[in-house]
Image: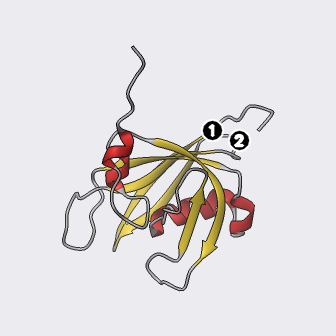
Amino acid sequence: MEALDLSGTIKANSDQLNVDDLVAGPITIQVEGVKLISDPKQSVHIYYYGCGNKPFKPCLTVRRILIALWGLDGNQWANRWMNLYVDASVSFGKQKNIGGIRVDAVSHITSTATISLTVRRGMKQHFTIKPIQLESNQ
């Protein structure tokens, strides 16, 4: 019997990719384009193939990781890949452990990278990002 994919029935009713969209597990996306929006909290909108106009709006930590690995020019991010997962330990303000989307692998890096970033005032965390190996025809 052929599998009956029910993933489309649990998508969050939102204008962006969010934690609830990853309840079935991590996803690997290919960047279609990046837009800079005049919103100080969610200024970067990453559109990816198949997003259905629900962009990934990365948090400050993920933006810092992507800029460290891919550079400042968002136009150069097109056609690159990233793996997104839910980090259940992410807190927001007074809400503890509500979960947030993080990146743990990207294309266009040659080896595993560890980046130390501030996650809260006076607290740093190490993020390990693995390379996504692309086939030569991509």
Q: Which mark is residue 110?
A: 2
Q: Amino acid at mark 2?
A: Thr
Name the kind of residue labelled 1 in the image. Answer: Ile
The residue most toward the right is: 137
Tell me the quarter of the image containing the N terminus: top left
Which residue is rendered at x = 44% and y = 67% of the image? 59
Camera-side residue: 5 or 130? 5
Mark 1 vs mark 2, CA separation in Å: 9 Å
Depth check: give the residue in front, 100 or 38: 38
Occupied quadrant, residue 92? bottom left
Q: Position of residue 14 (x, y in %)?
A: 37, 65
Q: Which residue is mark 1?
A: 132
Residue at the top extreme of this rendering = 1
Q: Residues within 10 Å of mark 2 (few under 14, many from 20)?
A: few
User: Eyeballing the image, is 47 above or below 28?
Assistant: below
Report helix, strand or loop for mark 2: loop
Question: What is the quadrant of residue 124 in the picture?
Answer: bottom left
Name which residue lies at 47% across and 69% down. 60
Instruction: Locate the C terminus and report the quarter of the image it occupies.
Output: top right
